Image (cartoon, rainbow, N blue to C red):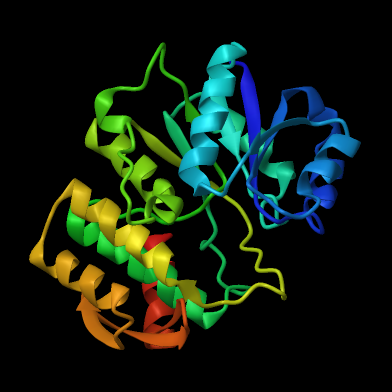
Amino acid sequence: MNTLFAIPAYQEATRIGKLLDLMAHLRKDTLVIDDGSTDATSEVVQNRGFRLIRHPENGGLEAAYESANLYARSNHYTQVIALDADGQHDPAYLPEFIRGLGHYDLVSGDRFHNLQEVPESKIASNLFAILLVREATGILLPDVSCGFRGWKLTAGELPQQKQIARSGSGHHRFGAIYRMLLDHLAIGETVGFVKIPAIYPPENPTHTRVQEIVGLVSALLNFRPSAKLQSILRDVRDKKHLTMNIQDLRFELVPETADAYRFVTDPEMAVNRMTSIHR
């Protein structure tokens, strides 16, 4: 299997160099998608001799994945592994993803097998997503939002149900992670996981952007519409302070900034639930 390593990047001039240095031995099979950066991201990539596609404007992960898939097909790759440009994904785990793709159609990172380095708010927000996906699909997965993932390419065009419809709402910028996973599940493709460390750079905020939540709920609504999901979507877009129960766990979504929420739940119960998911 020929693997393309794809790195979506937006405004990552100060961080992407370190990742590329770690991937120098994979340079000929690595593609960076500069998704409309206005900083020196592209210059850093070009100075290190990596392949580069530049988007004229920021389109989010959907646009980056689309470019990676088109490039991969045009250059005879049979699978793609994507990792973030900001240092949260250690390329030392790439061989495990390659091995995983020998058994599964989609392989995703699992960051929550060890919770020691995970902030409480991130345990809460990711558990919220895991349980909401389970409530909508009946399937319990250990991590539903990790961007370190690999997928096989089908011959020719992707099936229609795996095409991501664009909308004017902007949620396509953040919903691609969830839609990719749900699309694989919907058509019966196999999904596997690789245990990776959870890395949260100290300069990154631990709150969750509104559009990330909108992306998750919108993807679930496309998979299985419900009044509950519609209500969550409406309230999050209105930046309301929310309290709800999901799978017997109480979550509070507290508006933290103009465009982000802080997730709160009982920390001990959250750790116990996440631990039980990974047994």
Q: For this view, does 113 lie left or right of residue 104? A: right
Task: Tell which of 153 and 49 is nearer to you.
Answer: 49
Question: Residue 142's quadrant in the figure?
Answer: bottom left
Count of numbered marks: 0
Residue drawn at the location 54% of the way across and 59% of the way down: 111
Q: Quadrant of the N terminus?
A: top right
Outermost residue to the front:
56
Q: Position of residue 95 (x, y in %)?
A: 67, 33
Q: Is residue 209 above or below residue 133?
A: below
Outermost residue to the right:
47
Q: For this view, does 163 lie left or right of residue 187? A: right
Task: Tell which of 175 and 199 is nearer to you.
Answer: 175
Q: Is residue 99 visible?
A: no
Residue drawn at the location 79% of the way across and 29% of the way down: 26
Q: Is residue 70 above or below residue 250?
A: above
Q: For this view, does 276 lie left or right of residue 95? A: left
Q: Is residue 193 above or below residue 86?
A: above
Outermost residue to the left:
227
Q: For this view, does 194 lie left or right of residue 34? A: left
Q: Is residue 187 visible?
A: yes
Residue drawn at the location 28% of the way across and 52% of the way down: 219
Task: Tell which of 55 and 152 is nearer to you.
Answer: 55
Residue drawn at the location 18% of the way across and 65% of the way down: 229
Q: Position of residue 181 (x, y in %)?
A: 36, 43
Q: Quadrant of the C terminus?
A: bottom left
Q: Is residue 150 above or below residue 84?
A: above
Question: Residue 274's quadrant in the figure?
Answer: bottom left
